[in-house]
Image (cartoon, rainbow, N blue to C red):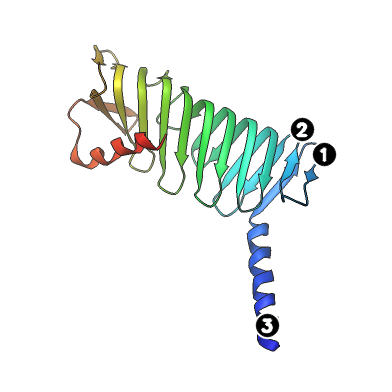
Amino acid sequence: MRRSLALWILLGLALALRFASFSVEPFGAQRLNLDTGVTTLPQGGILTDNQNGLRLRTEYAEYKEGAFIRARGVELISGKEVFRAQSLEHDIPKQEARFTGLIFANPDLRDLKADRALALFEEEIVVLKGRVSAQSPRLTAETMVIDLKGRQALLLGSFTYQEEGRATLRGQGPKARLHLRFQAGKVQANSRIPPEALRLAPYADRL
């Protein structure tokens, strides 16, 4: 009996800790479906994942503790990165988020846009596809994979890249590649992919 009681206490503490790591500030009504465990925020709100440092502001959201967040009209702040998008689906256990209509920014990239994107928070990788473009550095691409931790990126498929004060680099066809390295406020572009950056290409298949 004591063992069973102890197990229940431990389970209760574990659930409390999990729920405590996820805080919600609704802008209006907050509706909980007792059958599914899904909470809806019709007017949106601010959801904060205290464990992973993610702060999400939404115009509309549905979420289930420890499972998922689905939202529209979103702004997601993660460390030095800001994601703004038409929609978001965040798989909490996998720490993966899928976006549509994304606008991304961090210290290395400004006004980076894509029709859809995938953020892998634990691996610090962002994959973008569909009309990828950025204002700084100036580029367009079919697909882009960003290594946030390594401060590098890979353009895959047809692309254009405008070197500052220099010529425009172009690639055509599905096998075209361009490696970008961000360092000291500058960008180094190279069509010869360094061995350590080859691992980025397979991430494109995740989206």
Identify the image quadrant of residue 108. Answer: top left
Q: Secondary structure at mark 3?
A: helix
Left or right, 127 with reference to 67: left
Left or right, 11 with reference to 101: right
Q: Identify the residue at image location x=46%, y=38%.
A: 119
Instruction: Look at the numbered discs 1 and 3 and tell me whether their residues touch, using CB distance below 8 Å.
Output: no
Q: Secondary structure at mark 2?
A: loop
Instruction: Look at the numbered discs 1 and 2 and tell me whether their residues touch, using CB distance below 8 Å.
Output: yes
Which numbered disc covers residue 29? Answer: 1
Q: Identify the residue at image location x=36%, y=35%.
A: 205
Q: Which residue is mark 3?
A: 4
Amino acid at the residue labelled 2: Gln
Q: CA distance from mark 1 to mark 2?
A: 7 Å
Q: Position of residue 133 (x, y in %)?
A: 41, 19
Left or right, 153 with reference to 10: left
Which numbered disc covers residue 68? Answer: none
